[in-house]
Image: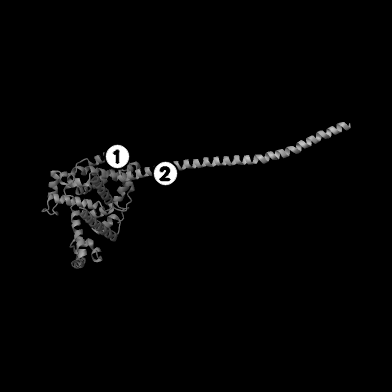
């Protein structure tokens, strides 16, 4: 739609009014030349007429039953204050959000449980590996230790033998 | 227009403080308006009171969120239109507005009380047109729907709407234009799918 009409569409749809005659004159001139704007304005006019049919009859309010306020208060007492949970339970959108949240929570739960298990498994595997490594190291360290012990032991034995011989010699000399 | 300092604002503040007399005043002041809005949209007398009760219950519970940016009537109007659309959704829009759902009295009333409507158009055609426009209005946002209904059904001018909503006139014009374009596009889509 062209600006000449778009800027004054409310005046055009409202129809001839004293304040909008000049505006309408320019708009009519444009509409006479522009098929696109004419078609669109025609569609808007038809829809506006239909929307105006949603107007209630003038005498409708007169039929109001007495005691309306009391019935409103009864309903308020019956409903009680709106809880945040009502928003989830009562509206379709809320229910969808609740279902999506539950699904997400479930997924996160499954992920955490499985990742925890695999972490535990890897920790167990790591510990087993460490134990093996330590055993290997212990086994590897034992041999030289024993050798060292033997090496250590042999001078001790030697010195005690020497001591015994020295004592014997001393004894014989006496 | 300043909605924070008016007599209406003082009334709202009393309702926010849970003053029951003030709430009663709000109900009595707007009950006829709410009734006529509901009946205008639904043309169903039997359910109009039920929905009106629901509207005022919502007003009671939600008034603490009223921020004085618009008039109380504009706010209540929006709640009322939303309740009508909730009702339509629950009752499966299409069935509700056809003739079978109307009482004889309602049909006669509709015939007699709408001088602006072309009497040569058969009732079933008019009901189908009503069905169509309600469906099209469900395709725009709550704000757009309230604005166009306030303009065309309640007959408020752009200047009055600016005062009621706290928006400036140009914003109102742009919003109304966009709404009208959306309605046209929705009508085009609906025609193509039929």
Say which quarter of the image contains residue B160. Answer: bottom left
* CA neighbours of label 2 inside 10 A, class few (<14), some (14 to 19), many (20+): few
Q: B89 or B82: nearer the eye?
A: B89
x, y percentage for residue A121? 49, 40
Q: A169 or A117: nearer the eye?
A: A169
Q: Which residue is mark 1?
A: A79
- Where does the N terminus of chain B fall, quadrant-wise? bottom left
x, y percentage for residue B95? 19, 45
Q: B75 or A102: nearer the eye?
A: A102
Which secondary structure lies at badge 2? helix
B28 left or right of A159? Answer: left
B113 left or right of B144? Answer: left
Tag 2 subunit: A
Tag 1 subunit: A
What residue is at 29 percent from the left and 55 percent from the top?
B165
Looking at the image, the residue that sits furthest to the left is B120
x, y percentage for residue A74? 26, 38
Which of marks 1 and 2 precedes in the sequence? 1
B191 left or right of A84? Answer: left
* CA neighbours of label 1 inside 10 A, class few (<14), some (14 to 19), many (20+): few
What residue is at 85 percent from the left and 33 percent from the top?
A169
How far apart marks 2 and 1 lie (CA) works out to 36 Å
Say which quarter of the image contains residue B58. Answer: top left
Which secondary structure lies at badge 1? helix
Say which quarter of the image contains residue A14. Answer: bottom left
Q: Which residue is mark 2?
A: A108
x, y percentage for residue B105? 13, 44
């Amino acid at each position: 739609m062209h600006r000449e009409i778009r800027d004054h569409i409310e005046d055009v749809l409202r129809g001839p009014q004293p304040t909008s005659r000049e505006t309408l004159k320019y708009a009519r001139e444009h509409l006479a030349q522009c098929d696109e704007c004419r078609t669109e304005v025609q569609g808007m006019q038809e829809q506006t007429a239909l929307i105006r049919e949603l107007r209630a009859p003038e005498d409708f309010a007169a039929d109001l039953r007495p005691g309306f306020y009391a019935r409103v208060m009864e309903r308020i007492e019956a409903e009680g204050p709106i809880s945040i949970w009502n928003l989830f339970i009562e509206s379709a959108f809320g229910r969808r959000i609740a279902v999506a949240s539950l699904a997400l929570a479930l997924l996160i739960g499954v992920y955490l449980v499985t990742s925890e298990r695999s972490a535990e498994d890897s920790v167990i595997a790591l510990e087993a590996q460490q134990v093996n490594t330590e055993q290997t190291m212990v086994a590897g360290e034992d041999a030289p230790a024993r050798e060292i012990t033997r090496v250590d032991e042999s001078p001790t034995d030697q010195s005690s033998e020497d001591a015994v011989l020295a004592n014997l010699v001393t004894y014989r000399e006496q | 227009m300043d909605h924070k300092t008016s007599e209406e604002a003082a009334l709202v503040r009393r309702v926010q403080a849970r003053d029951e007399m003030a709430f009663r005043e709000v109900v009595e002041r707007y009950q006829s308006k709410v009734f006529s809005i509901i009946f205008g949209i639904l043309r169903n007398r039997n359910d109009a009171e039920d929905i009106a009760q629901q509207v005022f219950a919502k007003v009671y519970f939600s008034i603490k969120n009223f921020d004085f940016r618009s008039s109380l009537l504009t706010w209540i109007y929006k709640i009322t239109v939303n309740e009508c659309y909730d009702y339509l959704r629950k009752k499966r829009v299409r069935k509700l507005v056809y003739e079978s759902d109307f009482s004889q009295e309602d049909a006669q009333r509709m015939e007699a009380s709408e001088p602006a409507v072309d009497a040569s158009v058969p009732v079933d055609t008019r009901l189908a047109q009503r069905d169509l426009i309600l469906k099209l209005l469900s395709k725009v946002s709550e704000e757009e729907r309230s604005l166009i209904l306030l303009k065309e059904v309640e007959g408020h001018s752009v200047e009055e709407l600016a005062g009621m909503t706290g928006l400036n006139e140009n914003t109102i014009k742009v919003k109304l234009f966009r709404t009208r374009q959306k309605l046209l596009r929705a009508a085009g889509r609906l025609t193509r799918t039929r």
